[in-house]
Image (cartoon, rainbow, N blue to C red):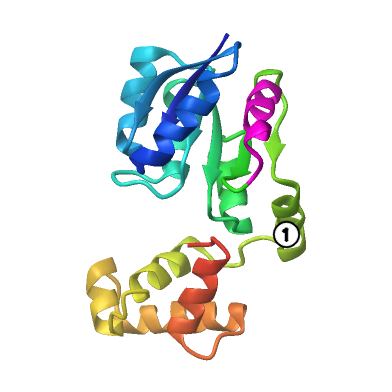
Amino acid sequence: MIRVLLAEDQAMVRGALSALLSREKDIEVVAEVGRGDEVVHMALMTQPNVALLDIEMPGLDGLAAAQALHDALPNCRSVILTTFGRSGYLRRAMESGAVGFLLKDAPAADLAIALRRVMAGERVVDPDLALSALSEGNNPLTNREREVLVAALPGLSHAEIAARLSLSEGTVRNHISAAMQKLGARNRMEAARLAEQKGWL
């Protein structure tokens, strides 16, 4: 029996996934949570074989939850299920210990098959997304450049970003300039949006 933990913040989607998986004779949904920061606690209580994690959740995103789960319960396999088909997310998911990355618009029957394949020790990745990730290459941004662009997304000034990250304004300008050059962007907002679209932030 494949024991599944579902982590999805939209109650209707979570209920639909649970109902769908419960129709399979060899799959049992043992826990459901609506926040990423509840994943590890619930997994330790219920000991699932597989955790099905959405990316966008309150408390902790699915990628961070996958990493925390990998550290706390290494025998539990994490599968990311998301509407966000961004190649950068795929790379970050694999780096966080996830063994699967599926899109929510895939056929419903594919989900149960994917969980069985994951239990058999395979990695399961949406094929179109895998091709996209290969063609786009690695994230060119450093961790600090990513932090600065994340802070720039709400439209903060250089001074506000500097204060938030405990950096000098000159350092912020240097990181933004480097990120803009790497991304071929005309300004910092364009650089931040481009990086976000690729799942690099």
Nearest to the observer: residue 91 or residue 46: 46
Q: Is residue 191 above or below residue 23?
A: below
At mark 1, the secondary structure is: helix
State whether residue 70 appears in this view: no
Identity, as a three-letter code, of the amino acid under mark 1? Ser
Left-right relation of 38 to 6: left
Identify which residue is drawn at 42% across, 23% down: 72
Furthest-top residue in this view = 1
What residue sits 54% from the left and 40% below the top? 80
Instruction: From the viewer's perspective, tell me whether residue 26 is left or right of residue 126.
Output: left
- Quadrant of the rendering where the N terminus is positioned: top right
- Vertical placement of 144 versus 106: above or below? below
Percent x, y of residue 194? 54, 75
Measured from the top left, where is residue 105 in percent x and y? 60, 48
Look at the image and give the residue range highlighted in magenta.
106-118
Task: Find disc 1 in the rendering and name its residue.
Answer: 132
| x, y percent for residue 20 | 53, 27
Residue at image location 54% in from the left, 55% down from the top: 84
Left/right of residue 162 with respect to residue 3 in the rendered view: left
Q: Is residue 119 above or below residue 140?
A: above
